[in-house]
Amino acid sequence: MEKLLGLPVLASKHGQDVDSFIIYIHWLMILLFVGWLAFFCWTLFRFRRSNHPKADYVGAKGATSTYLEVVVAIIEAVLLIGFAIPLWAKRVDEFPSEKEATVVRVVAQQFGWNFIYPGPDGEFGRQEFNLLTPSNPLGQDKNDPKSKDDVTTLNDMHVPVDKPVIVHLTSKDVIHSFKVIAMRTTQDAIPGIRIPTWFTPTREGRYQINCAQLCGNGHYNMSLGFMTVESAEKFDTWVKEKSKTGAASFE
């Protein structure tokens, strides 16, 4: 069914639940489309002019349409209460521990994605919004020893496969929205607020990062970001190499 609906490649653990929900909604839409189209065709035939030369302004007197509307409302309630809310609650209640996950700070801006990783010491340096300056666009405390080996990259996100990834998301300027279709994850990035979201990659590869919120004339440039899912060994090597040079972020 996924191929029939043309759903994009799936590369996250929770994504199958999202796809299943999408499929259920499509089945409902297909049934509604076929049902209402059949009803429309029937009314065209049933109330054709040759059979009813004089207009009847009373209309239908039966309760069939009411029953059908109630059934549709019940199905929609089941989808919402039985699938959508539990799926959301599961994502919130099962938030992984940072000790067992790869933690990345993501700072969105016009027009790109800044990624910050803790270096080999496994700890982030101090980062505060009040430290933002033209020469320090990410608000990092350069005097904090823990900042010395932190890794910052532009539009280049790396994560290990089969391990939870926690993203702490914020924005420097306007509202953006961090969206990785293959991971089935979308989260708004709001200035002044750091919002956590998480997912578990299950397939190695390179996946596009999009901004799902119109953020200015250069909005299209937000799609230049990519996420590379790789083995834990390759990820550790990448972090160590980057921490030696410190990939500087842009202003």
Image: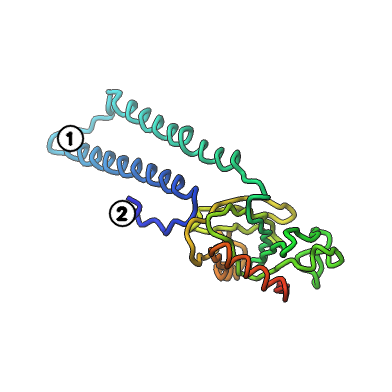
* Most foreground residue, 52 or 45: 45
Residue type indicated by callout 1 = Arg
Quarter assignment of residue 125 = bottom right
Residue at 42% x, 35% y is 76
Q: Name the mark on residue 4.
A: 2
- 141 vs 71, left or right, is right
Q: Neighbour class for label 1 at 10 Å: few (<14), some, many (≥20)?
A: few
First reached walking from the N terminus: tag 1 or tag 2: 2
For mark 1, give the secondary structure: helix
Of discs 1 and 2, which sits in the foreground? 2
Q: Is residue 3 above or below residue 147?
A: above
- 124 vs 220, left or right, is right
Residue at 68% x, 60% y is 174
Residue at 56% x, 71% y is 224
* Most foreground residue, 222 or 36: 222
Residue at image mark 1: 46
Q: Is residue 4 above or below residue 73?
A: below
- 66 vs 96, left or right, is left
Q: Is residue 168 above or below residue 219?
A: above
Q: In which quadrant is the C terminus drawn?
A: bottom right
